[in-house]
Amino acid sequence: MQAELDGLIDRGLTVLTGGTGLLLVLFAFFGGPQRWLPPELGLLVAVVCFTAGGIRIARLPYARRVDAALKGQFRTRDAAGPNPAALRGFMRRPAPRVAVVVFGAVVVALLGWPVGMQQLQTEVTTGLTMFAAPLLVAATSLAVLYCLVILLGPWGAIRLGGPDATPGYSLPSYLALVFTAGIAAGIVLWGPAEALVHAQRPPPHAGVTPGTQPAAITGVATSFIHWGITAWAAYAAIAVPLAYAVFNRDAPLRLASVVLPASPPDARAARFIDGVGLLAVIGGIATSLALVADQFVRGAVVSFGIGGSAVDRTIVIAAIVLVATVTAITGVHRGVRRLAALTVAGFALVWTFVLTVGPTGEVLALAGAGAGEYLRTLPLASVRVGGDWVRAWPLYNWAWWFSWAPFAGVFTAAISRGRTLRMVIGASVLATAGATIAWFAVMGPAAVVLLGGTPVGDTAVVGFRLLAVLPAGGLLSVAFLALIMLFMITSADAATLVLATVDPQTAADSVSTAVIGWAALLALVTIAVAATGGAATLQALTVMTGVPVAALALAAMGSSIVWWRRRDGTERSLIRAVIERLPTVPTYHDLYR
């Protein structure tokens, strides 16, 4: 009976996806505002298509056996199905209650004191980045050096889970999971927009005239700095120590294990660290969801003249959370992995199309000049702490990246069993930063070249304005909308798994219930914040958690180095391994006798 019901649901999802997808293709080829279709219905068709398609992909059967290689990682395959009693029990736990109280207070303050909360946002942002600047700069700079030491030194050969451990996921799947979980749809928004913003309003210390070629080069280089290796190293500073603590020191999968691997579950210090991480995860994902829903709706208005209301934002948020919940319940090995692969494929497709049909020569020339400027200015940019622009851009970015580290770091650590530390760094820093810079190296210069003569305007729609001037712009806009949703879904499903797993009160057979409970709480917080227009305020409050997480990252890196120095390992550095692989050239002394 259950098999027949599943088959009926799958067939219905397939038909729904195909029918609504056909309508979207018609929208794309007609282009412009669709006068023959009500705006609200047009956006609903798009959301239904993406939602049904995402759920159908997540529900595809898993062909390979999930074996012991996934031990210690996210698994919901064998979890008991959710039920009302279990959901009521979930809401009686301390962690969800604390989250409800904290974020409920934020929503009430946004409703009753909007002007004061806006002023608080400004004061928090300014004060935090001013007083925490040395800490943030030290944490990001040391994180980069930490990753470099692991990458080149002997510690990089340490295998998570022991010498005989094997990875649970193929290398392509692992790379896709790490990349899509660690970065939300912000990459889609800021890829075209940030270089254009800095080209028209360059950093004061750059000493270039706005709107000129040097300003354009500075804009591209600045976007690389904010989204490149320095940013992704913040995640690795949490992920690597936590993965080692979990798989090599038998610590529980929780944020506190990075510095307190042997701490009991109810220890106050450990509970405080986990609590800060939990609030950071919810605040970060809820903020991104609210901003992404707004970007999605604005993009639909600009591209097709459909949608635009608060109801539309609520529909988009609900759709993203629904797909993320289904994929999280199916497990990392099934739905989460598939959606990550689809996201990377769409990402590469849009990137390739824009590079091919856009002003390729000018884009590559500007990207190359920007890369050179990036390498030249990176050392000084990494330690700069003074000035309003520095506080508003790099320091704020570092705090935001660290506020996401509890979620991205825990997720990366959980799926890294069987990998060497060098591979974790290569995947979570080098590969991810490389993919991010590649995106910014095409989308940013393309926007500067094609839109540089016009004001930036609304940064949320710069990408749609860029696509509108390219061939097949309507079809590209549909792909862009889908990419926005996919990136947010892949971050949200990973976040719900992290929230469900790190809670010590989540039993092994109740992960599905916890996923549904946290996803519902996440949706309610996001919808409430979006309805009150407080996404920017919540973002500023979430950034506050980035400061203690940065301090935690420094402690985690120090603790892990102490652990590794005490072990009697025989691992080789990367340099020594390369030298030993070089061919030996024999010397014949008898020739000179």
Image (cartoon, grey):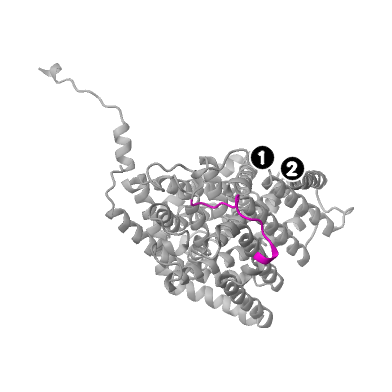
* Category of crowding for the residue at label 2, using alpha-carbon neighbours closer than 10 angstroms: few (below 14), some (14–19), many (at least 20): some
Q: Residue placed at 69% from the left, 79% from the top? A: 111
> Could you tell me residue 203's position as x and y percent?
50, 62
In the image, what residue type sits under mark 1? Answer: Val
> Could you tell me residue 157's position as x and y percent?
36, 44
Query: From what the image shows, is residue 584 above or below residue 505?
Result: above
Query: From what the image shows, is residue 400 above or below residue 102?
Result: above
> Could you tell me residue 556's position as x and y percent?
39, 61
> Could you tell me residue 387's position as x and y percent?
46, 70
Q: Secondary structure at mark 1?
A: helix
**In the image, is residue 73 part of the stretch drawn in magenta?**
yes
Q: Quadrant of the C terminus?
A: top left
- Residue 586 sits in which quadrant? top left
Q: Is residue 526 left or right of residue 131?
A: right
Asked whether disc 2 touches disc 1, contact meaning CB atoms under 8 Å apart, the reply is yes
Determine which of the numbered discs, if any, sits on residue 357 in the image. 1
In the image, what residue type sits under mark 2? Answer: Ala
* Category of crowding for the residue at label 1, using alpha-carbon neighbours closer than 10 angstroms: few (below 14), some (14–19), many (at least 20): few
Between the residue at mark 2 and the residue at mark 1, the CA separation in whole angstroms equals: 9 Å
Determine which of the numbered discs, if any, sits on residue 472 in the image. 2
Viewer-side residue, 276 vs 122? 276
Q: What secondary structure predominates along the stretch shown in magenta?
A: loop
Q: Secondary structure at mark 2?
A: loop
Residue farthest toward the left in the current orientation of the protein: 593
Determine which of the numbered discs, if any, sits on residue 250 in the image. none
**In the image, is residue 144 part of the stretch drawn in magenta?**
no
Magenta range is 72-86
Q: Is residue 268 left or right of residue 314?
A: left
